[in-house]
């Protein structure tokens, strides 16, 4: 029996491809995922089959989705797959252990090697009315469509910056919803970068352009360089007021989906003791890792969007590379030619990603336009004003200090939703890069768990 007990957290494209490489090498990884079924965010499957085919659910990504799902199904019996299983802590004192919640039971799982492929979530910023019923993240709006086969409203406005903005708006249009408008916070001039990207990735640009064109042909208003002012409506969304340059405008809708690219899920790497470094492109702190995802902690690997936002194709490659790094570290042979091929493909994708991000810039001036009464941290109901006062007084020059003084990031989401906003606010007020205001340290549990549990069993893979 092997004395190597690898555990993979996340059954998205990165986790699935990592598992396949380990199985090929004769290992039997445990694969944990809090979702019902494998596929991760992009290739999310409904909890039960709803009769829609791959083309209907995944559009242009249908064949990749099928390949990831079939690969995972093919691993059945060769891996220990545990769906609906949340990993909420990593402890390394007195042996490597994960704290896990599954079907209401808590247990600890020992590991020798840990591959973290935990993906990303939406990045949101606060503005007046963002917590009202009917306001969703772009990812949540898409999840409703993919997993539940429903839309978040009848007349939906999409707002923000990032490739998902146009993709989800197009998916809603295709599903029969009325897309009222696409309000891009980036200026039209930023889209000139797409011409440069077209030289490297013509398919990506053609696909994006086709979404924009089909939205325009369907009569959807696409506007650039906007900033939201407030959501209209009491019980739920009835419209959005926004500015475009010096002009004030409003638009009626019954739902708003918004977001600003993605935020890597890095808390477990933090709890595992990994070092972090600031990444200017993602405007986020990422685990220190080599190109194969090998972190500065022996036996801990990161891959996919949780190691830095690079998209689903890169996630598949990085999943394989991280598994190869593990094999290398335990003295097992790896296919050197395949590894070289993967590294070359990854380099190409990273070049494309750098260009893509320039076409969808982050609205760095966001807080110049937000009222002090707006909720900054919805878990703890902290207003922007409270944080601004702590920063102006000079007592909070760093984000963990801001948390201690105001409770921003101390609630149920553990800062997963509000920490990008708190960091951006702090750096904007200090007129400095977000790299200079620190990183909100992860705390267990990384996601909400019931109080008063007891560890039911000790489980070693
Ligand atoms: C909401 C959303 C929608 C997206 N839609 C698209 C799209 O339509 N097109 C596109 O090109 N890109 C999309 N992206 C980006 C794309 O999903 C990613 O690039 C790709 O899925 C990354 O793959 P991954 O394997 O790194 O992570 P993911 O696919 O995100 O998979 C991570 C997995 O880890 C699991 N997980 C995370 N934390 C834990 C934990 N603590 N315990 C147990 N399990 C855990 C999650 O349940 C998930 O299944 C989307 C991203 C998001 C966040």
Image: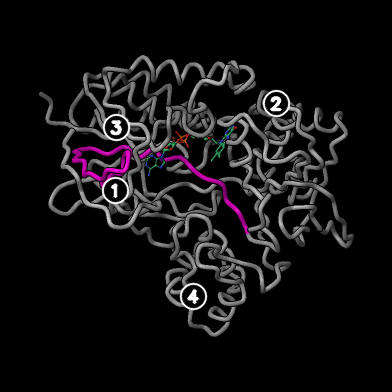
Picture coordinates of residue 411, whole percent (x, y): 45, 63
* Label 2 with label 4: CB-CB less than 8 Å: no
**Alpha carbon separation for disc pair 1 and 4:** 33 Å
- Residue that protrudes farthest toward the left in the picture: 1
What residue sits 76% from the left and 38% below the top?
154
Secondary structure character of the magenta stretch overall: strand
**Of the image marks 1 and 4, the number of the one nearer the N terminus:** 1
- Residue situated in front as seen by the camera: 255 or 370: 255
**Of the image marks 3 and 1, the number of the one nearer the N terminus:** 1
For mark 2, what is the residue? 207
- Residue that protrudes farthest toward the bottom in the picture: 393
Horizontal arrangement in the rendering, residue 177 relative to residue 401 (left or right): right
Mark 4 burial class by Cα count in 10 Å: few <14, some 14-19, many 20+: many
Local SS, label 2: helix
* Label 3 with label 1: CB-CB less than 8 Å: no
**Alpha carbon separation for disc pair 3 and 1:** 13 Å
For mark 3, what is the residue? 325
Task: Please tell me whether mark 2 or mark 3 is closer to you in this view.
Answer: 2
**Of the image marks 2 and 3, the number of the one nearer the N terminus:** 2
Local SS, label 4: helix
Mark 2 burial class by Cα count in 10 Å: few <14, some 14-19, many 20+: few
Task: Please tell me whether mark 1 or mark 4 is closer to you in this view.
Answer: 4
The label number, if any, that marks residue 296 in the structure image: 1
**Alpha carbon separation for disc pair 1 and 2:** 38 Å
For mark 4, what is the residue? 406
Task: Please tell me whether mark 2 or mark 4 is closer to you in this view.
Answer: 4
Mark 1 burial class by Cα count in 10 Å: few <14, some 14-19, many 20+: some
Picture coordinates of residue 388, whole percent (x, y): 59, 76
* Label 1 with label 2: CB-CB less than 8 Å: no
**Of the image marks 2 and 4, the number of the one nearer the N terminus:** 2
**Alpha carbon separation for disc pair 2 and 4:** 44 Å
Give the residues drawn in magenta, as a range.
99-125
């Amino acid at each position: 029996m092997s004395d190597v007990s690898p555990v993979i957290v996340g059954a998205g494209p990165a986790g699935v491809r990592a598992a396949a490489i380990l199985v090929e090498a004769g290992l039997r990884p445990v694969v944990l995922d809090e979702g019902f079924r494998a596929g991760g965010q992009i290739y999310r499957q409904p909890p039960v089959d709803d009769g829609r085919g791959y083309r209907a659910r995944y559009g242009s990504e249908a064949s990749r989705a099928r390949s990831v799902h079939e690969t995972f199904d093919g691993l059945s019996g060769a891996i220990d797959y545990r769906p609906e299983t949340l990993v909420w802590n990593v402890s390394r004192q007195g042996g490597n252990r994960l704290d896990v919640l599954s079907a209401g039971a808590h247990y600890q799982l020992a590991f020798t090697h840990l591959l973290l492929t935990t993906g990303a979530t939406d990045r949101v910023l606060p503005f007046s009315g963002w917590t009202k019923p009917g306001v969703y993240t772009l990812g949540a709006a898409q999840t409703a469509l993919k997993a539940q086969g429903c839309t978040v409203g009848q007349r939906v406005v999409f707002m923000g910056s990032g490739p998902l903005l146009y993709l989800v708006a197009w998916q809603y249009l295709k599903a029969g919803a009325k897309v009222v408008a696409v309000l891009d916070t980036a200026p039209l001039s930023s889209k000139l970068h797409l011409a440069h990207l077209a030289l490297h990735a013509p398919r990506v640009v053609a696909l994006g352009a086709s979404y924009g064109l089909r939205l325009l042909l369907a009569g959807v208003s696409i506007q650039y360089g906007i900033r939201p002012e407030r959501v209209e409506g009491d019980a739920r969304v009835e419209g959005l007021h926004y500015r475009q340059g010096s002009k004030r405008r409003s638009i009626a809708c019954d739902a708003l989906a918004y977001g600003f690219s993605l935020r890597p899920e890095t808390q477990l790497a933090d709890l595992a003791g990994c070092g972090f470094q600031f990444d200017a492109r993602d405007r986020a702190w990422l685990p220190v890792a080599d190109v194969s995802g090998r972190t500065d902690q022996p036996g801990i690997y990161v891959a996919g969007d949780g190691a830095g936002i690079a998209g689903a194709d890169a996630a598949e490659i990085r999943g394989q590379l991280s598994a190869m790094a593990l094999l290398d570290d335990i003295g097992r042979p790896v296919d050197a030619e395949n590894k070289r091929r993967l590294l070359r493909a990854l380099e190409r994708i990273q070049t494309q990603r750098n260009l893509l991000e320039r076409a969808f810039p982050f609205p760095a001036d966001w807080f110049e336009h937000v009222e002090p009464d707006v909720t900054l941290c919805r878990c703890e109901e902290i207003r922007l004003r409270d944080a601004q006062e702590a920063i102006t007084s000079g007592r909070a020059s760093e984000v963990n200090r801001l948390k201690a003084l105001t409770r921003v990031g101390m609630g149920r989401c553990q800062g997963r939703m509000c920490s990008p906003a708190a960091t951006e606010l702090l750096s904007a007020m200090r007129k400095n890069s977000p790299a200079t205001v620190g990183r909100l340290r992860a705390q267990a549990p990384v996601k909400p768990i019931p109080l008063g549990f007891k560890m039911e069993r000790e489980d070693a893979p």
